Image (cartoon, helix red, strand yellow):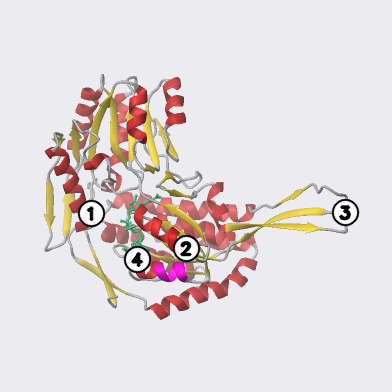
Amino acid sequence: MPKQFKVNNPATGELIAEVKVNSEEEIKQSLKNGHDSFEKWSKINAHERSRLLRNWSHIIQENKEQIAELMTLENGKPLKESLGEVDYATSYIDWYAEEAKRIYGRTIPAATETKRIVISKQPIGLVAAITPWNFPAAMMTRKAAPALAAGCTFIVKPAEDTPLTTIKLIELAHEVGIPTDVVQYVIGDGKEVGDLFTNSEYVRKITFTGSTPVGKSLIKNSADTVKHVTMELGGHAPLIIAEDADLEFAVSQTIISKFRNAGQTCVCTNRIIVHENVVEEFSKKLTEKVKKLKVGNGLEKDTQIGPIINEKGYDKIVSQIHDALDKGAEALVGNQYNANKEQGYFFVYPTVLKNVNLNMMIMQEETFGPVAPIISFKEIDEAIEIANSTPYGLAAYFFTNDYRTGTYLHDHLDFGIVGWNDGAPSAAHVPFGGLKESGLGREGGTEGIEPYLETKYLSIGNV
Ligand code: NAP
């Protein structure tokens, strides 16, 4: 492993920082420290843990502008989106600061008069997290906050492309008094750190957000020590436009769902499935709006679409567009690029494709870019079949004002998150997560603290 990781601005290719890579010994020591500090942290009363989490949230908010700028520098997303992500990240800390005080047990009536039965919850131990580059603040806090609230200790490995935001947030946690061994970060190569995490006897849970292939390998590697796992993996979200949909509204929501973070989110719309009677009108309206999206450096005030994170991501998007065009699709707007491999910046202009079909790569593989492929349907069951024809099951969206069509779609779409006339359903107070190969477990809401707790059953006899 190199001794340092270079962190570059994806909008310009410029070097922003060099970050020290931890050695194997250092990472093992951090894991031991996390394990050793568990006993004390887990015994601190829940109200005190809640207070520390609230203070963490406050200090992040006090530094909001600086954190957002750092995030835009390393990730490329427009500054407005980075500011929004800081709020989104602290909303998880705020939510779980409250949930810390609501970790309830229960009693169960015994089958004999001489027994009492008590069920309690206890934190599971040291939690090791691996996070992606696309939401460097929020993907970390939605794991750290419930873990710390539950009384677990926490260690995170951020993505190589975007470690700076995570480092800053963890430093702020230490500043407000969360002990340095209770919440830690380590820097290193994904595979190497992943192996150290999964092989460690100290780690009781692996929580991961990232691609499905890496998630599968972490599940396999966690088996030997029977660790708990939470997996937030890839997606291929369908967005269905029914014949009766309010097209103006549907277009504005499609823009949000498709083009946020330049299309680099797991819940981004990846396929637009439109009733044949409205497909022309919808495509025209969408194209008009997409033409106005401003592409550029996220630090410039009016930028709406930032760069693609790196060359690998860029190559994948370009090959999906070219594959679709080769197989008969038509670009209504986009298919334009501004990339410089030597300097290291990669922009894809927002693209709308019509006449796509299921044989195109873009309809099978996650795109992670600002490309909107449109396919039409006649009957609603056909739309459902297209929507479900993927191993992924993270998010799905549909637009209709007919309650029968809406409830039918909800009942038949195999996705963990469903937005009905809603292109942005994510929030701290709701359970976020996928079906099928999109993952295991939920983050957010009352469900999001459960994966950090064990259930203990006490039977008292001879009462
Ligand atoms: P990725 O390649 O899987 O990387 C994610 C993290 O895993 C990074 O920290 C990476 O480290 C690390 N990693 C890479 N190989 C590893 C290995 N063999 N063992 C252990 N860790 C390893 O995914 P990405 O490209 O960063 O992120 C995009 C993916 O995340 C997409 O598939 C997206 O859908 C998914 N995602 C899902 C959610 C959700 O909530 N379901 C949210 C956001 C993103 P390095 O950076 O050092 O390689």
Marks 4 & 1, CB-CB < 8 Å contact? no
Give the Cα distance between marks 3 and 1.
64 Å
Label 2 CA crowd tier, 10 Å (few <14, some 14–19, many 20+)? many
Marks 1 & 2, CB-CB < 8 Å contact? no
* Amino acid type, mark 1: Gly
Give the Cα distance between marks 4 and 2.
15 Å
Mark found first going from the N terminus, 4 or 2:
4
* Amino acid type, mark 3: Thr
Residue labelled with disc 1: 313
> For the N terminus, which image quadrant?
bottom left
Rendering quadrant holding ligand 1: bottom left
Q: Is mark 2 within 8 Å of ligand 1?
A: no
Give the Cα distance between marks 4 and 1.
17 Å
Query: Which element is circle 2 on?
Result: helix
Residue labelled with disc 3: 114
Mark found first going from the N terminus, 2 or 3:
3
Residue 377 in sight here: yes
Give the Cα distance between marks 4 and 3.
54 Å
Residue, x 30% and y 44% (percent of image)? 260
Please determine whether, in this image, residue 292 is positioned above or below residue 34.
above
Q: Is mark 1 within 8 Å of ligand 1?
A: yes
Mark found first going from the N terminus, 1 or 2:
2
Please determine whether, in this image, residue 418 is positioned above or below residue 225.
above
Expressed as whole percent of the image width and height from the top left, the position of residue 413 reads: 42, 33
Between 456 and 158, the residue placed more toward the observer is: 456
Which circle, 4 or 2, is nearer the viewer? Answer: 2
Any mark on residue 390, and which?
none
Residue labelled with disc 2: 222
Query: Which element is circle 3 on?
Result: loop
